[in-house]
Amino acid sequence: MQTPPLAHHGRFDYRAITDRDTHRWPKDATLAVYIGLNLEHYAFGEGRGVGIAPPAPEGEPDVLNHAWREYGNRVGAWRCLALFEALSLPVGVIANTSLLDHCPSLLDAFHARGDELIAHGHTNAERQGQMPVAQERALIEQCRARLAERYGSPPTGWLSPWISESRHTPDLLAEAGFGYTLNWAHDDRPTPLTTRHGTLWSVPYPQEINDIPTISTHRVSMTEFCTMARDQFHELLEQSRHQPLVMGIALHPFIVGQPFRLRQLRTLLTELSRYGTEEGVWWTTPGQIAAQCTDTLPVTAHQ
């Protein structure tokens, strides 16, 4: 008796990394590196959130964890902005649209220096994967419209709060006009996803070189996190001699914006930023990576 195949998402087929691509990134670079800075806002006293301590008892506002996250918007993000400016590093700003109600000047400051704004739902206090289709469609469309209204052009990329997807999310993103998603962490290179409305690019987004799961969940120190990022960079740069690859560094300012961590982040980024296209490194944003893929790579269904 033959065992039936497991359920499949139907978005892409298996492809080994040894099936190498032959294109190059701009200026003949082989490794595209981006910083994804998550700017998030949470409802007070309700919804989900990453905590540094056990949550407050039911019915009691969780002041400790709410204030810890708010530190990122009031302090940490501004210090990160100054660091990126000092090093002339581009940033992909992954933003909740609730920030336009809470602290619009923060998003304005990143937009003013030319950073990419990436839609990140309305608030990280909710999961879109649990929404009915109509509600999820409205969320995606409203987030895109709000960012377009304020900044003159719609975002091209999306990262779901909590990386929460329904079975319809890629279709709804493509339907709304998005060109890429950061939700899938299955490869070190971009992948075209099949949707009912054409191709949606998957740009690799890290789940280990990411301060929330690594530092907050796994309790890794900032020193070790920087070692991980440094080793990731040099190993991928070496691997990229054979084919173009992508490295993301996912940061949250309520974590890395803490002064003792910021100091180590500055040392790390100062070191890595010395590598440019002459060394094979393209410092970029997820949107530029997706645009380059759209322009240069053939799209094969279920690649």
Image (cartoon, grey):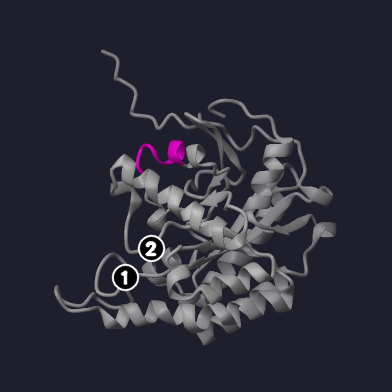
Quarter of the image containing the C terminus? top right
Residue visible at 56% across and 63% down in the picture: 150
> Is mark 1 in CB contact (under 8 Å) with mark 2?
yes
> What is the secondary structure assignment of the residue under circle 1?
loop
Residue 176: x and y, percent? 49, 42
**What numbered label is drawn on residue 194?**
none
Which amino acid lies under the numbered mark 2 shown in the image of this protein?
Answer: Thr
**Span highlighted in magenta in the image:** 165-172
**Neighbour tally class for label 1: few under 14, some 14-19, many 20 plus, Cα within 10 Å:** some
Residue 224: x and y, percent? 52, 72
Q: Earlier in the sequence, mark 1 or mark 2?
A: 1
Query: Up-down: is 109 above or below 295?
Result: below
Residue farthest to the top, as pictured: 1
Query: Up-down: is 24 above or below 126?
Result: above
Whether residue 35 can be seen here: no
Residue visible at 62% across and 76% down in the picture: 81
Query: Up-down: is 201 above or below 282?
Result: above
Task: Residue 19: name its quadrant.
Answer: top right
Whether residue 203 can be seen here: yes
Quarter of the image containing the N terminus? top left
Q: Closest to the observer: 170 or 138?
A: 138
Q: Badge 1 is on which residue?
A: 43
Residue 109: x and y, percent? 61, 74
> Image check: 278 left or right of 246?
right
> What is the secondary structure assignment of the residue under circle 2?
loop
Residue visible at 50% across and 44% down in the picture: 186
**What numbered label is drawn on residue 123?**
2
**Neighbour tally class for label 2: few under 14, some 14-19, many 20 plus, Cα within 10 Å:** many
Q: Specify whether residue 166 is painted magenta.
A: yes
